[in-house]
Image (cartoon, grey):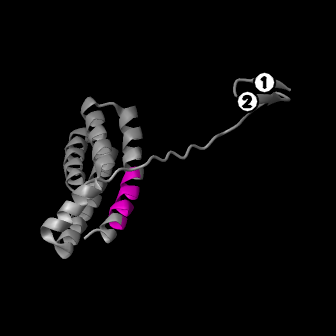
Amino acid sequence: MTRVGSGVRREGICMTRMTRLRPEESIRLEREQLAALYASVGKAQAEEIICRAMEELATRLALMERAHAAGELAALAKGARGLAAIAGQVGMTTLARVTGDVAACAERRDAAALGATLARLIRISDRSLTAIWDTAGTSG
């Protein structure tokens, strides 16, 4: 038995170990921004604003994924900039930042970075939506 790179060679067959990466990063919400929204318009209207923002985020994310699949990078960048603005308005700091990164990759036409960053955005969007509803339920 001999070592070959990251694998072990046995009887002419190279066996390598596979490691599955499960990237996870913390997300950041501006709780003060949400609290200010609740204070300025009241609980019912704040929840309506947040609900509309979440629907718009989901719609824009789906449009971005379709634009990416179709190779329409200008449309993807435009959608990402809009999504970043909405996320920023409701205090979803991490989502806004990563969406800005997606827009930058699309504008640079950097396919490898765009694929990785868009995948990161999708992971973060799911966690951000859950976090904002959890936070919204305790605000007001």
At mark 2, the secondary structure is strand
| Res. 13 visible in picture | no
Instruction: Indicate whether residue 133 is drawn in magenta.
Output: yes
Total numbered labels: 2
Q: Amino acid at mark 2?
A: Gly
Numbered range of the magenta stretch: 124-134
> Quick one: quadrant of the N terminus?
top right
Residue drawn at 21 percent across, 39 percent down: 74
Q: State if disc 1 and disc 2 touch (CB < 8 Å).
A: yes
Mark sitting on residue 7: 2
| Quarter placement of the C terminus | bottom left
Residue 117 in view in this figure: yes
- How many other residues sit within 10 Å of disc 2, few (<14), some (14-19) or many (≥20)? some
Numbered badge on residue 63: none
Which residue carries the number 1 mark?
A: 3
**Relative horizontal placement of residue 135, taking residue 19 as reference (left or right):** left
Quarter assignment of residue 125: bottom left
Please give left or right for residue 33 compared with residue 15 in the image: left
The one nearer the camera, 118 or 132, is 132
Disc 1 marks a residue whose amino acid type is: Arg
Image location of residue 85, percent across then percent down: 19, 49
